[in-house]
Image: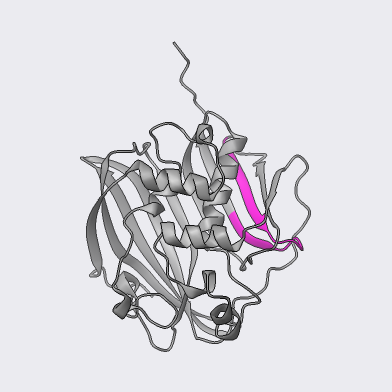
Amino acid sequence: MSAPQTRMLEQADRITAGPVERLAACLDLPREALSPGTLPPLWHWLFFLDSPPAAALGRDGHRADGGLAGHDPALPARMWAGGRLRFHQPVPVGTTLRRHSQVAEVRDRQGRSGTLRFVTLRHRFASDAALLIEEDQTIVFRAAGGSSAAAQPASALPEGAVLRTLVPDEVMLFRFSALTFNAHRIHYDAPYATAVENYPGLVVHGPLQAVLLAGHAGLCVPGARMVRFDFRAEAPAFCGRALHLACWPDAGRPGVWHAQSRDEEGGVCMRAEAEFDMFVEPGP
């Protein structure tokens, strides 16, 4: 069902270098891996941070009222399920962005663990009169007590897929939580994650996986500008376990790359698709 277009929020934030440098350090990226003076794709998530007081937080660390996405006591558990992003122009570090956000859609469906509610938030980022980023963010709400489904085994990767493996540890998860002011306890409180939300360990942030996949895809197409990134979380990934990143080009669509994160058993945790503007301006 569609939600009434009444819940909306207008904000402004300045894109500063400090958070960008700290996320690069969190991901162990050398400075030369970043485009000077330009925000990498998805790194706008370091800004426009929701900052409720501690007294406004619920048991899980999210704000108790749900913020713009709303709150239903019957569906208290929430996760970032996916997103669709369009990058119209680069975002210069030092610029001031305005963000317009609204609830675009609310849908309920039945899953294996009961009712799932998908809330889509629509964000538009502009500087002066220029629209720079369009983003649809999907959040899923479910009943408490049951963790998300385990990753399902995937088919073999295409020949020529570009692979990278890393092991997200407690320090990486803590630093990413701090950089995004994310207090969800499944990312840093192991007793809560295992005893209350029934995960086998600390959960790697969905946005962190998306940032890693977008960065990996960008390294596969040096010099090209990302113009689209769509991603969908399939299953959780866990701290201290190998996380495999894979990218490969779409055979029929020039400039389009597929990306996946997989757990150490090969199960798919996140699927993504990135599109690049393949035109590179010639040098002087």
- Prevailing secondary structure of the magenta residues: strand
Taking the spot 34% from the left edge, 53% from the top edge, the residue there is 47
In the displayed structure image, the side of residue 27 where residue 107 appears, left or right? left
The answer, for residue 242, to whether it is visible in the render is: yes
Q: Residue 56: where, in percent of width, then height? A: 30, 78
Which quadrant holds the N terminus? bottom left
Residue 41 in which image quadrant: top left
Q: Quadrant of the C terminus?
A: top left
In this rendering, the answer to whether 266 lies above or below 79 is above
- Name the foreground residue: 272 vs 95: 95
The answer, for residue 273, to whether it is visible in the render is no
Q: Residue furthest front?
A: 171
Q: Compared to 127, does 48 lie above or below? A: below
Count how many numbered circles sit on residues in the image.
0
Q: Residue at x 22, y 58 (%)?
A: 10
Quarter where residue 233 is shown:
bottom right
Query: x, y percentage for residue 180?
Result: 41, 59
Q: What residue occupies the far top of the structure in this picture?
A: 284
Q: Which residues are magenta?
A: 255-271
Q: Nearer the viewer, residue 10 or 253?
A: 10
- Percent across and percent down for residue 77 are 47, 80
Q: How is the image coloured?
A: one colour
Q: Which one is nearer the viewer's eye here, 284 or 26?
A: 26
Does residue 267 show up magenta in the picture? yes
Q: In x, y percent, where is residue 133?
A: 36, 46
Q: Is residue 138 magenta?
A: no
